Every structure is written in C-alpha cells, then in structure tokens.
Amino acid sequence: MSYLQKSGPDVFTGDLDITGHCTLGRVVLGSGSLEEHNEGFRVLTFVHDIGFNFGISASTPPAAADIVLSLDASTGATIQGAMSVSGNASVGGSVNIGGSLGISGSVTVQGTDVQLFSAERAGGNSHPGRALVHLGGDQLGINYASDFTAGVLIDSACAVSGALSAPSLACSLLQVAPGQSSVAITSQSGAVLLNLGASVNTFLNGLSAPVLESTGDTIVGGTLTVGGTNILNAIANAGGGGGVTIGSSGRALLEIIDSDNTGAEIKFGMNNAAWWSIYGTDVNGQFSIWRNIGSMFKAVSINAQAYTTFHGGSTNASDRSLKSNEQLVEQDECIELVKKVNALTYERNDMENGNRRIGFFANDFADNAPTSFNLTGKAQHFDRHGEREILTLDYSRLNCVLWTVCRNLLSRVEALEAQLS
C-alpha cells in the first residue's frame, strides 16, 4: 500500500504496514490512544490507563534492561541510564536518583529542604538528612537539628566574607579533622587569625570572639582586647566593659613570660595613656615598678636576693585623726629594752648571699618588749628548708624606743650641765 487516507474510523485487527504517507486523526492502541488536541494550543497526547514504557531493543516486547524511560501513574517517571537536559526541567514532585547527577547549569528548588541520606554511610542511624534548610527569617540552616550526628566536616580552605559567630561555645565550634595537624582561620591577606592544632598551641592574632575559653595553652600574637578595652586595662577595671577571670579548682595562675632576656611588662593607665608599668624581670632578674607619666622614673625595685629599694622614699600613714586613746611611753620601759636586747651581726641561712649583716633577733623583742609597743608580728616563710611560721620585727618602730631613750639622756645631760654652770 503506497498511500492511505480515510476520514472515518476504521479498525485493523492485524498488522498494518505503511511504506508511504499516512494521515491519522486518532490512533487507538489497545486500551490507550494517540491523538492530536487543539484546545487553545496544539499538542500530541498519549493516553493509557496504566503507563508507558519506552525501550530500545531488537525484540518485542523489550526486556526490562532495555527500558530507558518508564511512565507510571503511581511512581511517576523512571529513567534508566544517563539523562541529558539542554534546556529547563521542571519537576512538581520528588526526584529520586539512584546514580550520579551532573548539572552544568543552576538548580532551583522551590521548597524548604535539601535532604541527603545514605543508609550505608549512616552507620545504623536513621534521620531525615536535612543538609540544607530554608529557615524562617530567610536564614539558611546547615545540618538542621543535627540530623548528621557526626557534624559537618569542611575538608579544605573555607572563606567567610561576613561574621562568624557561635551563640554558645559550649559546643565544638571547630575541630581538627582526622589526619590533619591543625585548623586555621586566615584574613583576606593570608594572615593567620586563629590556629587550632592537636600538636601545637592555640594561636590568636586579631581574632574577635564573644566568648573565649581555652583549657590548654593560648598564644596571643598581638594585643588581646576584652570588652573593647585592652586586656591589661580590663584586668584593672573589670567594671569598665571587660574583665578577665583566672581560676580553677586549684591555684589560679597568670603567667607572663618572655621567650628571651627582654623581660615582661604590664601597663596601667587611663585616657589612653600608660601611667605606670610593672617590669618583671630585666636582665639582672629585677622586678620593678616604673612611673611613665612625665619623665620615666623607677619607683620600686626588688632584686634577685629579695632586697627592696624605694627610689623615691616611703612614708607611713600617721595622721592624728587616725589615732585615739594616746598615752605617753614610759621612759624606763624603753631604757630597760635597750639594756636587754643586743645588736648582732649574723648570716642569713635562707638566702644565697650569706654576707654578714647587722640587726636584731625578733625573738628578743618578743620576749622583752611590752606588748603595747607592737614591735613584732608573725608571717608564713618559705625557703629551701620548707614553709614555716616565723617572727617579724618592725625596725621603723624601734626609732620610737630610741627616741624616748635619747630624750631621757638629753634631759639628764641638761640637768648635769645646769649643775656645773
């Protein structure tokens, strides 16, 4: 048959071979049909009450492995093999991909969740796998509700152009990945801001964090600022917007140690000016306090042998308004004390420098001085012999004893001079 054209319906019960041109208004195929519709737009419509299989095969019917596209009313479209879409593709329901998906353009998901889950890699866990979630307030959530119990691993460089914050650092914000030696946060110029390592100390340089908690060593390469103020100012004035708490179940410890022989320094001041500095120590092992306002001046120094020098002098609070119930000292008590206590020379057995010196034993004054003189006290002392309680002596109060004895001598000398004259 070279040409067939018929305007009415016809039924063919056998095979129909057409080698030429054939125009059909509607073709009924078993319980399905193929026809063109023109209801505002022209479209070719395939209709079947079960579904369609499209196969590439030399046999009829094709084997299951030869089916490249299957359309089913309940399961939707199933593609077996690779799929290439050069234009747009729109899917109103779910998409399940058993193999790989390569996309050279953009992907738009008109929904709230992007879910990932592999039972093989979940290690027995079962969860929705909400990898990306569009949250309220137009916020993007990663690993929503901690579906992935092992967390999120970024296995290469990560650039953050905005703020990186953690409402609570009780969680593990950053962890060193298995096989990696450290984690580093760098600036756009490449400078290391934060370095976390399993084998290296924590290193900070120009990093801002709402809370900083470290259970190990922390190295600050620049200035550490707390609450908008320099850390040294914040220690001295925690109420001014910042503060530092140093404490543990044992002894609290703050170490400021130089790596060479330059020494360490702490500055105190106000109005953006350093008024005072504490140096500890210089090349001679000396601890000192300096005045910085105006010309530099060393106020106090303590050398390695614990000798203290007040370079500008020292005074005691002694105003009349601070004292009450005053009484004159008995001259005889002072004279008797001078008679009973001897000045001695001795060597200190608790100090490296064993040079002889002149002084007193506090014990002699404790045994012979009236308690109202308040010349001796007690202190905890620690040296190479261990820690023990010792007696102390207020050498400055001894001036009052000697003063009284001198006045007694002066009155007696004046009386003798009056008799001789």
Image: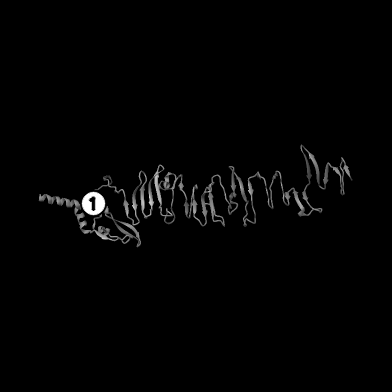
Left or right side of 115 for 337: left
Asked if one can make out residue 169 in the rendered structure from this viewpoint, the answer is no
Left or right side of 75 for 396: left
Going by the picture, which residue comes out furthest to the top?
Answer: 40
At a point 32% along the width and 53% down the height, the residue shown is 308
Going by the picture, which residue comes out furthest to the bottom?
Answer: 385
- Residue 355, image x and y in percent? 29, 60
Per the image, label 1 sits on a secondary structure element best described as helix
Left or right side of 268 for 94: right
Going by the picture, which residue comes out furthest to the right?
Answer: 1
The foreground one among 71 and 56 is: 56
Q: Quadrant of residue 390?
A: bottom left
Asked if one can make out residue 420 in the rendered structure from this viewpoint, the answer is yes
At label 1, counting other C-alpha atoms closer than 10 Å, the crowd grade (few under 14, some 14-19, many 20 or more) is some
The amino acid type of the residue labelled 1 equals Cys
The foreground one among 257 and 297 is: 297
Q: How does the figure colour the protein chain or chains?
A: one colour
- Residue 173, image x and y in percent? 54, 51
- Residue 373, image x and y in percent? 25, 53
Label 1 sits on residue: 400
